[in-house]
């Protein structure tokens, strides 16, 4: 029941975001403006984020902050609690401390990417491991499916606005 509620809530958020952005644009003008392949742009942004995240330098404060800049200031991360989504700032604080002693790695497989001029979503699955730097053993070893909703900002940069994993 919680999963159905959470999925319904996430679907509602995605629909609201997509409908809101679609009402602000003219699809004909978008096509005439530029033959840009937005799906390819989103894929590049998505892959660039994971490449940086998996690069082994997340313990460095500058690298951490640059990597986390992929997320929009208004990021929502719906939880599995049935509560309204919270922002990702709490997770970032925890993660920043955790990567000091644990090396993250996400083996990501993209299942689908859909994109318009302003909005996109990525359905993907991943095998997440964090290796304890002192012992060399996994401190985290899980598999998840996820959705990431991205919004293109005024500077043409794709930012994650919603991230939800199961």
Image (cartoon, rainbow, N blue to C red):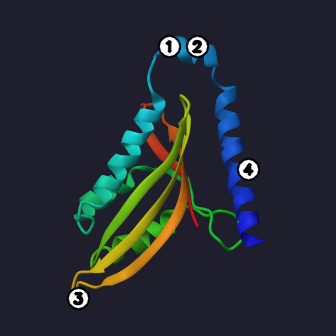
Residue beneath the point at 70% across and 60% down: 7
Between disc 1 and disc 3, whose residue precedes?
A: 1
Label 3 vs label 2: CA separation?
57 Å
Task: Give SS at disc 2.
Answer: helix
Q: Residue furthest bottom?
A: 135
Relative to 133, 92 lies left or right: right
Between disc 2 and disc 4, whose residue precedes?
A: 4
Label 4 vs label 1: CA separation?
30 Å
Disc 2: which residue:
29
Disc 3: which residue:
135
Q: Say which quarter of the image contains residue 28.
A: top right
Relative to 76, 90 lies left or right: left
Closer to us: 3 or 16: 3
Label 2 vs label 4: CA separation?
27 Å
**Mark 1 or mark 3, which is nearer to you?**
3
Residue 84 place in picture, x, y as percent? 70, 64
Between disc 3 and disc 4, whose residue precedes?
A: 4
Task: Give SS at disc 4.
Answer: helix
Circles 1 and 3, Cβ within 8 Å, touching? The answer is: no
Task: Give SS at disc 3.
Answer: loop
Q: Say which quarter of the image contains residue 78.
A: bottom right
Residue beneath the point at 71% across and 43% down: 16
Circles 2 and 1, Cβ within 8 Å, touching? The answer is: yes
């Amino acid at each position: 029941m919680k999963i159905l509620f959470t999925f319904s809530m996430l679907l509602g958020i995605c629909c609201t975001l997509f409908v809101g952005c679609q009402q602000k644009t003219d699809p004909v003008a978008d096509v005439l403006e530029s033959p840009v392949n937005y799906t390819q742009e989103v894929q590049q942004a998505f892959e660039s984020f994971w490449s940086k995240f998996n690069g082994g330098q997340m313990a460095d404060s500058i690298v951490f902050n640059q990597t986390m800049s992929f997320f929009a200031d208004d990021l929502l991360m719906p939880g599995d609690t049935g509560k309204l989504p919270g922002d990702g700032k709490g997770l970032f604080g925890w993660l920043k401390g955790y990567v000091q002693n644990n090396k993250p790695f996400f083996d990501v497989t993209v299942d689908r990417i859909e994109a318009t001029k302003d909005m996109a979503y990525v359905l993907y699955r991943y095998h997440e491991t964090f290796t304890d730097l002192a012992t060399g053993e996994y401190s985290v070893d899980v598999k998840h499916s996820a959705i990431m909703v991205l919004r293109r900002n005024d500077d043409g940069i794709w930012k994650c606005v919603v991230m939800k994993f199961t």
